[in-house]
Amino acid sequence: MFGLWFSLLGLLSAFLCSFNAKKRKRSQKDWFTLGFLLPGASFVILYLLPSGSDDPSQAAESLEFGEGEMIPSVNHLTHPAS
């Protein structure tokens, strides 16, 4: 009986998280899953995070390391056996 209630609570939380994630410009699938697995904590986490952006390139800019590189260059490294 506990499993049934937990599943119903998880589904309700999942749908609410998915709906709120869309309003906050976040991935609905990811937040649906988190809402199901973490019914109470997912709402807190969702609202503690800043809203997402419409522009995907703006999100990528926050991951830059310096001089516009997304990933630090490793071209100068060589394998010890070579």
Image: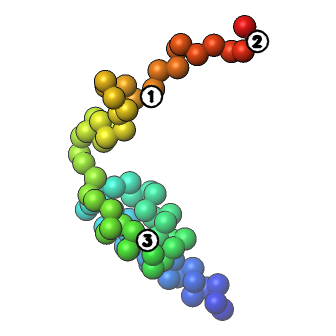
* Residue at image point 66% right, 92% down: 1
Local packing at callout 1 (Cα closer than 10 Å; few below 14, some 14-19, many 20+) is few
- Residue occupied by mark 2: 81
- Residue occupied by mark 3: 42
Instruction: Label 2, secondary structure: give it.
Output: loop
Gap in Å between the C-alphas at discs 2 and 1?
25 Å
Q: Disc 2 or disc 1, which is closer to the eye?
A: 2
**Above or below for 67 versus 14:** above
| Amino acid on which disc 3 is placed | Ser
**In the rendered view, does 45 fall on the left or right side of 39?**
left
| Amino acid on which disc 2 is placed | Ala
Local packing at callout 2 (Cα closer than 10 Å; few below 14, some 14-19, many 20+) is few
Instruction: Label 1, secondary structure: give it.
Output: loop
Residue 53 x %, y %? 24, 48
Gap in Å between the C-alphas at discs 3 and 1?
30 Å
Local packing at callout 3 (Cα closer than 10 Å; few below 14, some 14-19, many 20+) is many
**Above or below for 42 versus 74:** below
**Above or below for 51 versus 11:** above
Regarding residue 68, the answer to whether it shows in the image is yes
* Residue at image point 43% right, 71% down: 42
Out of 14 and 49, give the one closest to the viewer. Answer: 49
Regarding residue 15, the answer to whether it shows in the image is no
Gap in Å between the C-alphas at discs 2 and 3?
48 Å
- Residue occupied by mark 1: 71
Q: Along the polypeptide, which appears first: circle 2 or circle 3? A: 3
